[in-house]
Amino acid sequence: MKIERQAFFWLMVAALFFFLIDQLKEILLPFVVGIGFAYGLNPVADMLERKGVSRAVASILLVSLLIIFFVLLVVFLAPVVIAQASQFMEALPGELVRLRGLMETWARDNLGQSFPQAEQSIGEAVNWVSENSGTVASWVAQSVWTQGRALFAIVSLLLIAPLVTFYLLIDWKRMLAEVDNALPREHADTLRSMGRDINAAVGAFVRGQGTVCLVLGLFYALGLWLVGLDYGVLIGFATGLMAFVPFLGWIVGTITATTLAVIQFWPHWFPVILVVCVFLAGQALDAGFLSPKVVGPKIGLHPVWLIFALFAFSYLFGLVGTLVAVPMAAAVGVIVRYSVRAYRASSVYTGDVPVVGDGSDKV
């Protein structure tokens, strides 16, 4: 049937698309970042254009403000985060020794005759973490340098991403018009409807979830700093960045910060409770206000599917896959919903046999 040939064609197109991404993933980072910024800033450019500002001037203004924002972010926040990361790596062996002492003290007081076995298990676990932490850090650094070619990636990101953002903002409407003209005329209306749903889902993430991550990162960093937790700014920002996957960033941040708080403040429990309260307040802020008001229900993806997409895309395409995992998952979710709807309306699902010559094989 014709619809089967069309499905085969689009499956081949999708396979070719993912193959090209896999082959070019090492050089795609500045282009992916530029596309993301252009997509997020396009509504603002449209608003300025409606107010009488030319598209070129609006694009220059938005890209300039974007560059200024990130320069200020790097100047004021990067030194603090880098310093805390360096201090954390230097202090990690000593913190692990303190953690081992606390766990052994607790086990000695509460386990009685089972203490020797618990002491051995605690020692083996802490020794494993201590021995492998440096190896893991070296592996990460080497992977970033070898696979991403760090210096080239940083320079290209700083130079190419703003240019990509600028030119995409200028040509956004023309590109959409070209895509619309290339749609198969028979299915143009359906594809436009699918495109609008994909735009709503991806836009909710790129514009909404990005704002949520920034707000939560600042909230957690400020809250942990006020509590007095060592490395609180680093942990707070990392938790905010991981907030693009529901619950995952919050769980990892809560466990990490609480563990460090126990090591730092023991035997005083009140600061540890304050650390937990910071994360509970952040989760309440996200669930009660930020996600409903800023993101809304348009992504429409289950958290398990989001976590799977993150792991799958990051495994297949590295850093680029990590950046595009959730938007791609949102787009795939829309396509799957339309595909299921088309399948349920087809003879494959209903079992209806088309009559020869009635024209149904042309659908």
Image (cartoon, rainbow, N blue to C red):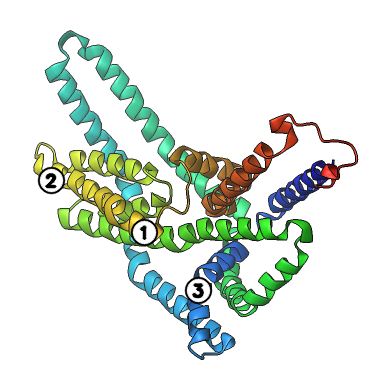
Classify 242 as above or below 180: above
Closer to the chain start, of discs 2 and 3, is 3
Look at 33% across and 41% down and name the residue there. 251
Q: CA distance from mark 2 to mark 1?
A: 26 Å
Q: CA distance from mark 3 to mark 1?
A: 18 Å
Q: Sort mark 1 into few (<14), some (14-19) or many (20+) by Cα contacts within 10 Å.
A: many
SS of the residue under disc 3: helix
Q: Which residue is mark 3?
A: 43
- Compared to 189, does 347 lie above or below? above
Labelled pair 2, 1 in contact (Cβ < 8 Å): no
What amino acid is found at the position of numbered circle 3 in the picture?
Pro
* Mark 2 to mark 3 CA distance (whole Å): 44 Å
**Is residue 360 rendered to the left or right of residue 215?**
right
Q: Find residue 321 and report its horizontal and vertical position in percent.
A: 58, 50
Q: Which residue is mark 1?
A: 212
Q: Total number of numbered labels?
A: 3
Q: Residue at x 36, y 34 (%)?
A: 130
Taking depth in this image into account, of 144 and 354 the one nearest to the observer is 354
Q: Position of residue 73 (x, y in %)?
A: 38, 70
